[in-house]
Amino acid sequence: MISKIFFSVVAISLFLGLALDAATIDEEQAGKVDFSYKNGSNGPSNWGKLKPEFSACSSGKNQSPVNILKNDTVYNKNLTPLSKNYTAFANATLINWGFIIGLHYNGDIGGMEINGKKYAFKQLHWHSPSEHLIDGQRYDAEMHLVHEAEDRSVAVSAILYQYGDTTKDVDPFLAKLNHGLEKLSKEKCEKDQVSQIPVGMLSTKHITRSTRKYYRYVGSFTTPPCTENVIWTVLSKARSISKEQVAALKAPLTADFKDNARPEQELNGRQIELYDELKYKGGLLTKRKEPV
Ligand SMILES: *[C@@H]1O[C@H](CO)[C@@H](O)[C@H](O)[C@H]1NC(C)=O
Ligand SMILES: *[C@@H]1O[C@H](CO)[C@@H](O)[C@H](O)[C@H]1NC(C)=O
Ligand SMILES: *[C@@H]1O[C@H](CO)[C@@H](O)[C@H](O)[C@H]1NC(C)=O
Ligand SMILES: *[C@@H]1O[C@H](CO)[C@@H](O)[C@H](O)[C@H]1NC(C)=O
């Protein structure tokens, strides 16, 4: 069964994982937000002018995505291994938001903790090509896991994907969503509308795999309204994906949104921090004097 809801400012807020207050649905507004990824009057460099609520897209000084220069990152010994407590399986729904493909787990599936603060998992979605760059390199896709704390502050984890060397190098998580993505691409997603495909019980293990190295910085949403103070965790190790899988993620989107990566934003003096499990252990070892 496919349900359609209006794609509106409210839908965008929902997409961002913020609470949906039915009373705020303004059908007059439906479809009036019309940002795009192509250069032009509603392209990324003009997002901030499209609506007053989007002003951070142009005036913000802490925007995302950014280019992570490994040499310019600083190792922060206070960063800890990612602490997560997701449930193992949950019933999930694939969603075509018109500008992006996302996945929502029904109900509370747990979340992550940063600096003692708890962030509940809200939704995940994919961009292709990648939005974050590492040493100027753009990857083939990027998955964003969006989390929100009780005070509504947001933390997003990003996982980069690159095309594998062989046809066997597929992303096992997306492999489970093949059928749903195919169904989604057959749905006509009219402008201003959102389509959904239930995909049933889905493991969360692929989104919770631990990481030995990540980059941490404070940025923003990469889509309007480009809200700031988002804590970003970009995993350093890219995962493999096949060309067919990236094509399947693009298939349900209209031509203007098949490439949905926001251009690189200025760091404006922000420092990107590094968590490195090996360095951390190395740090302990260096306390013992090596025999000369
Ligand atoms: C679009 O704009 C960006 C940044 O202003 C520029 O780097 C890029 O070359 C432009 N692309 C096209 C197709 O004009
Ligand atoms: C990083 O620093 C090293 C040593 O200074 C240099 O050789 C290397 O080219 C730098 N890498 C980048 C990507 O700038
Ligand atoms: C999953 O959710 C769908 C509706 O989105 C429902 O029809 C289905 O019964 C649910 N499955 C399970 C196993 O709870
Ligand atoms: C994860 O931790 C939060 C905060 O302690 C808690 O509310 C939530 O129920 C936990 N979820 C799971 C799946 O354990």
Image (cartoon, rainbow, N blue to C red):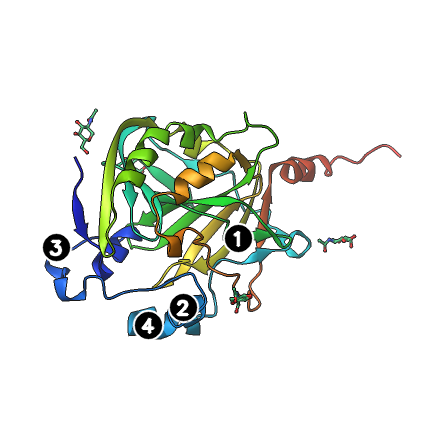
Left or right: 291, with 77 as reference point: right
Estimate the x, y position of residue 117 in percent, counting from the top left.
Answer: 37, 47
Q: Is the residue marked by circle 1 packed among few (<14), some (14-19), or many (20+) residues within 10 Å? A: many
Of callouts 3 and 4, which one flags the residue occurring earlier in the amino acid sequence? 3
Quadrant of the snapshot with the C terminus: top right
Estimate the x, y position of residue 229 in percent, counting from the top left.
Answer: 41, 60
Q: Secondary structure at mark 2?
A: helix
Residue at which label 4 appears = 50
In the image, residue 102 sits, relative to residue 285, either above or below, namely: below
Left or right: 178, with 70 as reference point: left
Left or right: 176, with 64 as reference point: left
**Image-quadrant location for residue 58:** bottom left
Q: Nearer the viewer, residue 181 or 125?
A: 181
Alpha-carbon span between mark 2 and mark 4: 10 Å
For the residue marked with disc 2, what is the amino acid? Cys
Residue at which label 1 appears = 132
For the residue marked with disc 3, what is the amino acid? Ala
Q: Nearer the viewer, mark 2 or mark 4?
A: 4
Of callouts 2 and 1, which one flags the residue occurring earlier in the amino acid sequence? 2
Of callouts 2 and 3, which one flags the residue occurring earlier in the amino acid sequence? 3
Left or right: 165, with 117 as reference point: right
Alpha-carbon span between mark 2 and mark 3: 26 Å
Of callouts 1 and 3, which one flags the residue occurring earlier in the amino acid sequence? 3
Query: Which residue sits at x=29%, y=45%?
Result: 96
Q: Nearer the viewer, residue 235 or 198?
A: 198
Query: Which residue sits at x=30%, y=52%?
Result: 98
Estimate the x, y position of residue 66 in percent, counting from the top left.
Answer: 54, 58
Residue at which label 2 appears = 57
